[in-house]
Amino acid sequence: MIRVMVAEDHTIVREGIKTLLGMCQDLQVVGEAGNGEQLLECLRRTPCDVVLLDISMPGVNGLEAIPRIRALADSPAILVLSMHDEAQMAARALKVGAAGYATKDSEPALLITAIRKVAAGGRYIDPALADRMVFEVGLTDSRPLHAQLSEREFSVFERLVRGEGVNEIAQHLAVSNKTVSTHKARLMQKLGMTSLADMVRYAIDHKLM
């Protein structure tokens, strides 16, 4: 039996996933969480084989949660489930420790296949993304600007475009306001932007929010 923890902040989506997995005799949902903090707390109490992880949760988001999950004793395999069909986002998730990346518009059968594959120690990439990852992520001339951002800069960028202020970001990431401001200045310089409106527009254009 493959034990699955579902981390997704939208209740309807979470219930749909639980219903889907409940139809498979070899899969069992052993816990659920609506944000990153809840997920980490659940994982400390409830062992599982696979975490199905939404990348855009409030609080500790998916990308930030992945290294923390990997640091746990007997850490489960992490399958990211995202609304972003963006090669760069998938590459970031895999780089920080996810075993797989599926998108929310995947066929249900593909999601089941992905869970079984990562539970067995394999890797899974959404087929629609696999080719694009090969061609986009490794080629410097076609890489988007945000590919230059460090993991922490990207995390600050994501939070800024979602409307969080410097103080709030500092609190969530457990760093000083000054550190967040430094990351903000660097990422804006790398993106060639001068305002939050520019960043929000960029995030929308690149399906990052």
Image (cartoon, rainbow, N blue to C red):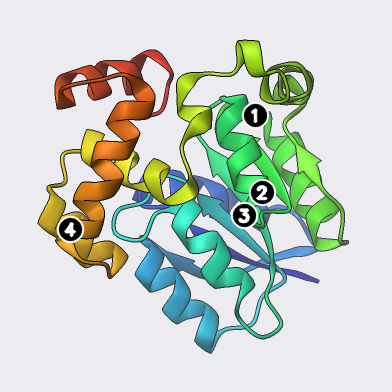
Q: Secondary structure at mark 1?
A: loop
The answer to whether the residue labelled 3 contacts the one labelled 1, judged by CB atoms less than 8 Å apart, is: no
Which residue sits at x=48%, y=62%?
65
Q: Quadrant of residue 140?
A: top right
Q: CA distance from mark 3 to mark 4?
A: 25 Å
Relative to the observer, which residue lies in front, 180 or 162?
Answer: 180
Q: Residue at x 66, y 41 (%)?
A: 101
Residue appearing at x 73%, y 53% in the figure: 99
State the image coordinates of residue 6 (x, y, percent, origin top left).
53, 60
- Marks 2 and 4 sit apart, C-alpha to C-alpha, by 27 Å
Asked whether the viewer can see residue 185, the reply is: yes
Q: Which mark is residue 96?
A: 3
Left or right of 34 on screen, residue 75: right
| Quarter that holds the C terminus | top left
* Amino acid type, callout 2: Lys
Q: In this figure, which residue is indicated by the disc labeled 2?
A: 95
Q: Which mark is residue 106?
A: 1
- Camera-side mark, 3 or 1: 3
Task: Determine the secondary structure under disc 4.
Answer: helix
Residue 134, position in %: x, y? Answer: 78, 23
